[in-house]
Amino acid sequence: MYLTRAEGKTLTSKLEEEIRKEQQYWRYIIERVFAVICTLAERGLPFRSDNEQFRTPNNRNYFGLLELVAKFDPFLRDHIDRYGNTGSGQPSYLSRTICEEIIQLMANKVTDTIVAEVKKAGYFSFSVDSTPDISHTDQLTLIIRYVT
C-alpha cells in the first residue's frame, strides 16, 4: 500500500532512488580509493606515515595520491573537502582501516588464485629459505613453482 503519489512515483520508489544514488556515490569513492591502493601496491611503495591528514606536507603516498587525483577529479575533491579529516565515527572510505581492509581483500584474492592454479597444475614444488635481517629477526621466504 502506497501513501502518496506525486508525478507518477510512489513514496517507496523515491526512497529506492535515493538509496541507489547513495550507493552509487560510495561506489565512485571506492573505485578511486581502490585505484590508488592498486597503484601503490603494484609499485611496492609505502602507503602511510605518522601524519595521516589531508593537505599536510608529509602525509606520504596514500593521501598524496588521493590529493593528486582530487586535483583533476571534482567529485573526489568535494568528497575530501567534506570528509577528508573528520576522524573516526564518520564514514569516508579514506581511512587507514578501509585501506587495510582493501589490501587484505586483495591479498586474499591473490592467495585464492594461486591456490586454485596450483591445484589445477597438479605438479608443483616448494622452496623455503630463512635468514635473519639486520635486527636479527628471521625472514622467511616461501617460493611456489608450478606449471600451468
Image (cartoon, grey):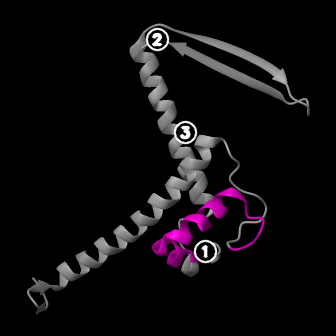
Look at mark 1 in the image and give the residue it sits on: 84
Q: Is residue 104 above or below residue 88?
A: above
| Viewport quadrant of the C terminus | top left
Query: In front here: 91 or 55?
Result: 55
Look at mark 3 in the image and give the residue it sits on: 107
Q: For the residues marked 3 and 1, what is the alpha-carbon distance in whole angstroms?
A: 26 Å
**Crowd band around label 3 with a 10 angstrom C-alpha radius: few (<14), some (14–19), many (20+):** few
Return the disc, 2 or 3, that comes first in the chain's sequence.
Answer: 3
Query: In front here: 54 or 21?
Result: 54
Tell me where residue 117 appears, x and y as whole percent.
43, 21
Residue in view at x 35 percent, y 68 percent: 24
Q: For the residues marked 2 and 1, what is the alpha-carbon distance in whole angstroms?
A: 46 Å
Q: Quadrant of residue 86?
A: bottom right
Amino acid on which disc 1 is placed: Gly
Secondary structure category for the residue under label 3: helix
Secondary structure category for the residue under label 2: loop
Q: Is 63 part of what is drawn in magenta?
A: yes
Residue in view at x 44 percent, y 58 percent: 31
Amino acid on which disc 2 is placed: Val
The residue range painted magenta reads 55-80
Residue in view at x 24 percent, y 75 percent: 16
Look at mark 2 in the image and give the residue it sits on: 147
Nearer the camera: disc 3 or disc 1: 1
Predominant secondary structure in magenta?
A: helix
